[in-house]
Amino acid sequence: MSSTASRQNGTWRNWGGTVSARPAREVTPACVDELAEAVRRAAEDGLRVKAVGSGHSFTSVAATDGVLIRPQLLTGIRTIDREAGTVTVEAGTPLKRLNLALAREGLSLTNMGDIMEQTVSGATATGTHGTGRDSGSIAAQIRGLELVTADGSVLTCSATENPEVFAAARIGLGALGVVTAITFAVEPVFLLHAREEPMPLDRVLAGFDELWAENEHFEFYWFPHTDSTNTKRNNRSAGPERPVGRLAGWYEDEFLSNGVFQAANWVGRAVPAAIPAIARISSRALSARTYTDIPYKVFTSPRRVRFVEMEYAVPREAVVDTLRELKAMVDRSPLRISFPVEVRTAPADDITLSTASGRDSAYIAVHMFRGTPYQAYFTAAERVFTAHEGRPHWGKVHTRDAEYLSRVYPRFAEFTALRNRLDPDRRFGNDYLRRVLGP
């Protein structure tokens, strides 16, 4: 086990540049026993403990002034159980590595988010999700997990073993312990047919329920200052496999969606008045396309333009009204928004603090280019979201506290009671958890 100073002169920073911290020490355990020993030693030294993956959260959920656990040596697949349809993977494994390894084994997750840079533990702890009519977040696909608790003991959890911990720890915010391994449900690899095309916003909103019902995975991006969206429908296909061509993929996904979009945001940051015109051009830049490929090549895409993000889950039946109110707010304000608004859905699940816990949900994500003031936009958007009992994504910018969250999560007290039992001394606490869970 290696223990080193944090990078950048002892300062840790997240991917979005919104959070920094100076931990007392940094530990990179090579096995579960070493991680458990690091937790016990931190307790002896009176230090708090947080594990951090790739730093893709925009909140300070993983920040600490104590011991920072880096799980990059805890990677790879432990076991594959084809009969049970599960795979057990070390917690520090990046989603990209997991997806590639599963594909080589002829297996796949049922659903996933749109990026795969996070570690499996970081992605599940904060509720990372994609879009799905019937299939939920990555955490909803967990069938078991292994957790190092505050006293350094190792706890295994599933629907039948420590079920009350399992119900909460799948999206545990790092508040219940350090997850060391996760067992996911998997299935034989399949093909998805993707249909991407522009569509007027009014048409999308008027037909949203139909578009949601007719497609296994539906999402869209609305470009502020325009009436335009880009829609994406993904459905299972019998084939044949017809992936995006290498040249077309480079042109659309790298050159346009990353290179040109980055340049446009630089211009917009320097000259905000130009943003509406840029938005109109951007909304017309991508043409319709269809392709058929294995899941991770359809669900995920490169995201090289850095940004800051807020995302809220609202009841699915409220999404159209919420979008209309968000658009009206942008239209009547002096705000200049260069990033599209992303809309996705998820079915209700049974995870205690999942943003889809107990209700079918729709997600609305707002973004601003990194380095651009975002507070006014996010404050106004948050006011719209909370009017519809919105639940903030745990890893994205928000200002909600325990008092608000206890009202929109029916099982909030269940989670905090479990936290009191597993971590009474708040070994895994930090300022963010104090705000969202209480002292």
Image (cartoon, rainbow, N blue to C red):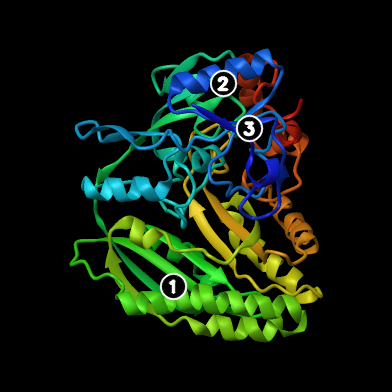
| 92 in relation to 314, above or below | above
Q: Which residue is mark 2?
A: 38
Name the secondary structure under disc 3.
Answer: loop
Q: Which residue is mark 3?
A: 410
Name the secondary structure under disc 2.
Answer: helix
Front-lying residue, 91 or 13 = 13
Q: Which residue is mark 1?
A: 253
* Residue type highlighted by circle 3: Pro
**Residue 91 visible in the current orientation:** yes
Name the secondary structure under disc 1.
Answer: helix
| 115 in relation to 292, above or below | above
Earlier residue among tags 2 and 3: 2
Q: CA distance from mark 3 to mark 1?
A: 40 Å
Which circle, 3 or 1, is nearer the viewer? 1
> Which residue is drawn at the image coordinates 70% and 37% (left, top)?
405
Query: Mark number for residue 363?
Result: none
Residue 120 lies, in percent from the top left, at 45, 41
Earlier residue among tags 2 and 1: 2
Tell me whether the residue at label 2 lies in contact with that at label 1, contact meaning CB atoms closer than 8 angstroms: no
Residue 355 lies, in percent from the top left, at 58, 43
Q: Quadrant of residue 254?
A: bottom left
